[in-house]
Image: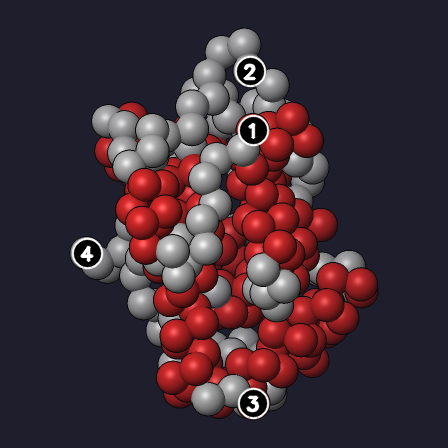
Amino acid sequence: MMGALTFRIFSALLIYPSEDLIANAGAFHAALDREAVAPLGERRALRRLIDEIACGDLYDLQERYGLLFDRTRSLSLHLFEHVHGESRDRGQAMVDLLALYEKAGLKATAAELPDFVPLFLEFLSTLPLEDARRHLGETAHILEALAERLKKRDSAYESVFRALVAIAEAKPDRDVVEALLQGPDPDPSDLVALDAAWEEEEVRFGPGTQSASGACSQDGLIARMRHAKRAVPNDISAQGVRR
């Protein structure tokens, strides 16, 4: 299925670094170029992150990942963290998204939360490309905000989110992105600021707010859709092909 391997590679790039990820990262360049789902410029930008992982020290990679995505709420890889926060709406949204995954034949473990971006990308890999691009567009405002925050930190992870936004059918509404970017974004070494950020009220989008193709409305996927350590997909071999 066109795009399946691309989404699985992006999922792998966003999981907690492991020896398996380092061992397989060298195959990612060719696989992404072969499918050519992401535009050429975005694929070239991804080389920095892929090379850093392929040539990096495991513990350094894990420490960097933890500082970015585990410690900093504004960089959370759980989509609902940026929309529902700790509100009661998140629970039903999780249930509904999990049901959507199960309908597509994707099984999550008990330790996984459905809105974890790598799991969401695995879900997209099971869909025809047109449907995957449509669902991806419903989260584009969150992905763009994450890219902007990673750019501020000069993080190579920015490239993954730029590529996903480029693939998405609907492009992010700038007003919605700016609203997300107005939230706290503390330095991960500032523990006091980090604690304060985790206590902030959730960002709320509802009727009357601007959105990209209903991305923040109660009717979109983002209204129906938190950190698990998923394994590198075992169908990305040393040759970067599906088994």
Residue 60 visible in the shown view: yes
Name which residue type carries label 3: Cys
Label pair 3/4, CB-CB below 8 angstroms: no
> Quadrant location of residue 65?
bottom left
- Label 3, label 4: how far apart the Cα atoms are: 32 Å
Q: Which residue is more in the foreground, 139 or 107?
A: 139
Q: Report x, y in % for residue 208.
A: 54, 10
Circle 4 residues within 10 Å: few <14, some 14–19, many ≥20 = few
- Label 4, label 1: how far apart the Cα atoms are: 33 Å
Name which residue type carries label 2: Thr
Label pair 2/3, CB-CB below 8 angstroms: no
Identify the residue shown where x is 48% and y is 85%: 22
Name which residue type carries label 1: Ala
Is 28 displayed left or right of 199 in the figure? right
What is the secondary structure assignment of the residue under circle 2? Answer: loop
The residue tagged 2 is 209
